Image (tube, helix red, strand yellow):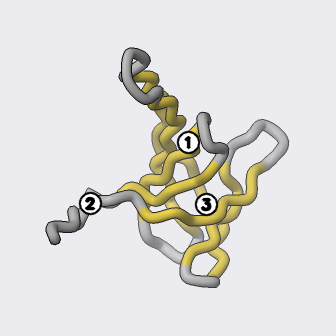
Amino acid sequence: MVVSLYTPKEIQALTDGSGEPAVVIRNGKRARVAAILNTWRIDDEWWREMISRQYFQLELKDGPVMTIFHDLTSDKWFQQRY
């Protein structure tokens, strides 16, 4: 069986009043968002299975930069690994 190393991992995100992530919870640990460095949206493949995602590149208070997305069709959050 082949498994992609870059498969998005489901996480939890707590949002502020505007719907942007303020806290990321991964592996049971909370990390506060220090800054949103970039954001973009992808809407694609309407002819097959709809993909609608809002991406955020975040700088966390504890230092690391990570990319997460909100899957707008399932209302779930994922960490995107590259």
- Please, what is the three-letter code of the amino acid marked with disc 3? Ala
- Please, what is the three-letter code of the amino acid marked with disc 2? Tyr
For residue 66, above or below residue 46 = below
Q: Position of residue 3 (x, y in %)?
A: 21, 67
Secondary structure beneath dot 3 equals strand
For residue 18, above or below residue 65 = above
For residue 10, above or below residue 56 = below
Say few, some or many: other residues with alpha carbon within 10 Å of mark 2 (under 14 / 14 to 19 / 20 or more). few
- Please, what is the three-letter code of the amino acid marked with disc 1? Asp
Corner quadrant of residue 48: top left
Residue in front for this viewpoint, 11 or 31: 11
Which of marks 1 and 3 precedes in the sequence?
A: 3
Residue in front for this viewpoint, 8 or 54: 8
Q: Nearer the viewer, mark 3 or mark 1?
A: 1
| Cβ atoms at labels 2 and 1 below 8 Å apart | no
Which of marks 3 and 2 precedes in the sequence?
A: 2
Residue holding disc 3: 34
Q: Position of residue 22 (x, y in %)?
A: 70, 56
